[in-house]
Image (cartoon, rainbow, N blue to C red):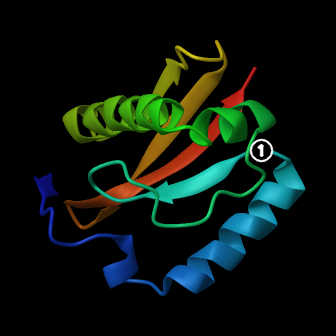
Amino acid sequence: MTDRSNRNISDIVDIEYLQDIQDSLGRIVGITTALLDPQGVPISRPTNLHAFCAMMQASEKGLEMCLNTNAQLIAENKRTGDTAVLTCPNSGLKTAAVPIFLDEEYLGSWLIGPIR
C-alpha cells in the first residue's frame, strides 16, 4: 500500500458526484457519512450529521477532538488496509472508516457513524 499525500479521492472522481452518492446512501440508511482525505480532513459535506457531532464541531475545541478521532481512524486504515472501528471518546458511540484505494494507493476514507 502506498500513501501519496498529494493525491486523494477528489483527484480521481468529481467530489459533487461522490457527494450525491453519499447523500443518497445517507438518506436511505439514515447514518452520518463523509469522505476524508488521507490526513483525515473531510473533503465532502457530512450527510445526516449526528446532532451531538454538530454540537461538538461548533466549537474549536470540539472540532479538534473530532479531527483527532478521524486521524486515529485514518492511521488504522493506513496501518491495516482495512476498515477501522473505534468508540468515540466524546459520545461513546461507534465510528468507522473504510479505506479507499486505487490499485495499492491510499486515497482517503469513507467515514460512517456515529452509530450505537
Let me know if residue 109 appears in the view. Answer: yes
The spot of residue 64 in percent (x, y) is 41, 35
Q: Identify whether 67 is placed above or below 102.
A: above
Tell which of 17 and 58 is nearer to you: 58
Residue on which the image places disc 1: 31
Residue beneath the point at 73% across and 47% down: 49
Q: Residue at position x 33%, y 29% from top?
A: 72
Q: Is residue 71 left or right of residue 53?
A: left
Residue 100 visible (yes or no): no
Counting from the top left corner in percent of width and height, residue 104 is at: 20, 60
Quarter holding residue 53? top right
* 94 relative to 75 in the view: left or right: right
* Residue found at x 32% / y 82%: 11
Number of marks? 1
Whole-percent x and y of residue 68?
A: 37, 31
Label 1 sits on what residue type?
A: Ile
Image vertical order of residue 67 relative to residue 29, above or below: above
Residue pictured at 26% horizontal, 34% vertical: 75
Residue 44: horizontal and vertical position, in percent? 54, 67
Q: Secondary structure at mark 1?
A: loop
10 Å neighbourhood of mark 1: few (<14), some, or many (≥20)? some
Q: Is residue 89 left or right of residue 83?
A: right
Which image quarter holds the C terminus?
top right
In this rendered view, identify the residue nearer to me: 108 or 103: 108
